[in-house]
Amino acid sequence: MAKKTIRDIEVKGKRALVRVDFNVPLDIKTGAISDDSRIRAVLPTIKYLVEHKAKVIICSHLGRPDGKVVEGLRMAPIEQRLSQLISLPVSTTSDCIGADVEKAVNNLKPGDILLLENLRFHAEEEANDPSFAQALAKLADIYVDDAFGTAHRAHASTVGVAKYLPAVAGFLMEKELEALGSLLTSPEHPFGALLGGAKVSDKIGLIQNIMDKVDLLLIGGGMAATFLKAQGYELGLSPVEAEKQGLAKELMEAAKRNGGALLLPTDVIVASNISPEAKGEAVGVSNIPANKSIVDIGPQTVKHFSQKIKQCRTIFWNGPMGVYEIEQFATGTKAMAELLASLKATTIVGGGSTAEIVEEMNLANKMTHVSTGGGASLKFLEGKSLPGVAVLQDK
């Protein structure tokens, strides 16, 4: 971890602008927070700043208001939940910049916490507008980035403010960079990657970057269809990225050359439609009916993948094994989650839907690390520089 953290600077009496990722899922009917894991993840940073007598000014986006004020995306429910979790009062503002906000900041005492209104109510946030970044920076003496989930975005609150304030990492950012960084630099072998999700195109950069580091690559989910098609299988109505078949072949050949194994499903669950009423049946990959599509990995594949994964000392998992939103097509995904949670190996879960599944199943505390950033963790593991990390001060 080559970046400075809040441990490396003096924070006492300083106004600390803390960028977090409080983009939590909200219940459509009630507006209540349905998963507060992103709020819990930054509590160590906030507690440290409070205990060390900083004036804590928290900022985040919530949802996609597209530069307009959307009443259902105000930060009020987050303020309530944060206050409960940290057992301290949290005050809020009706905007994130401007005279009223500056006044609220001036009234802060060391150890106080202020939560700014949704950053994305201003179109200038996502445009990385310099004057908006300056208006945010004006509120503080130091900038703390603890929003790994947005580190791959060059926005005013993730990159712009660092031009005007000394910028350091919070503890969640540090934890993410160390956990994911260890996969690229010093994984304990055998090292396996379990990849799923809908499209090969989303994971190409990741596969190419870790191919020479892994001993085992297991592919499930919708993306497996493109690899199976490249091997000549008929896949019925399963969506296939036709333009990626050549690449899938190349990746399979590269795995062989590198001495690693690339494993694909040998059986799958198929259904005539994707709905809660649909019935699935297990078939071998060479017997997929013309009028059905793949919705999950099959029982033999679960067994085979499990045997191989059990031999690994390090496992990285990103992407569901099937249409996990529908209960009867979530069996493969749940089996993999339960297996990883039971291992004594280092288990690292990439963010996004994979993290949500693990949280929903109450297995997050049984994994070594569950990333809070879907897109950010993929970009990082592709070996790309994250704009929100690049701007932080080096140690």
Image: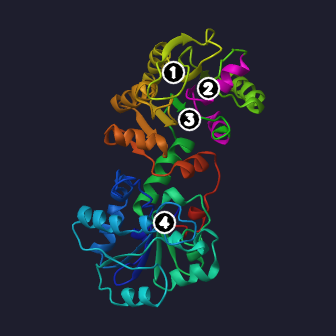
Secondary-structure class at tag 2? helix
Residue type for callout 1: Ile
**Hey, what amino acid is under mark 2?**
Ala
The span from disc 4 to disc 1 (Cα, nearest Å) is 36 Å
Please state the extent of the stretch shown in magenta in the rendering.
Answer: 205-231
Q: Are marks 3 and 1 in contact (CB under 8 Å)?
A: no
- Please tell me how crowded label 1 is: few (under 14), some (14-19), or many (20+) other residues with Cα within 10 Å: many
| Residue at 73%, 23% in the rendered image | 253
In the image shown, does 77 or 129 lie closer to the viewer?
77
Q: Position of residue 227 (x, y in %)?
A: 67, 24
Say if 97 sits above or below 63 in the image: below
Q: Which mark is residue 224?
A: 2
Nearer to me, 285 or 113: 285
Of the pair 1 and 385, the residue shown nearer to us: 385
Marked residue nearer the N-terminal end (4 or 1)? 4
Q: Residue 282: image x %, image y %?
A: 50, 13
Count of all numbered marks drawn on residues in the image? 4
Q: Examine the image and state in which quarter residue 185 appears.
A: top right
Give the secondary structure at mark 4: loop
Residue hosting label 4: 61
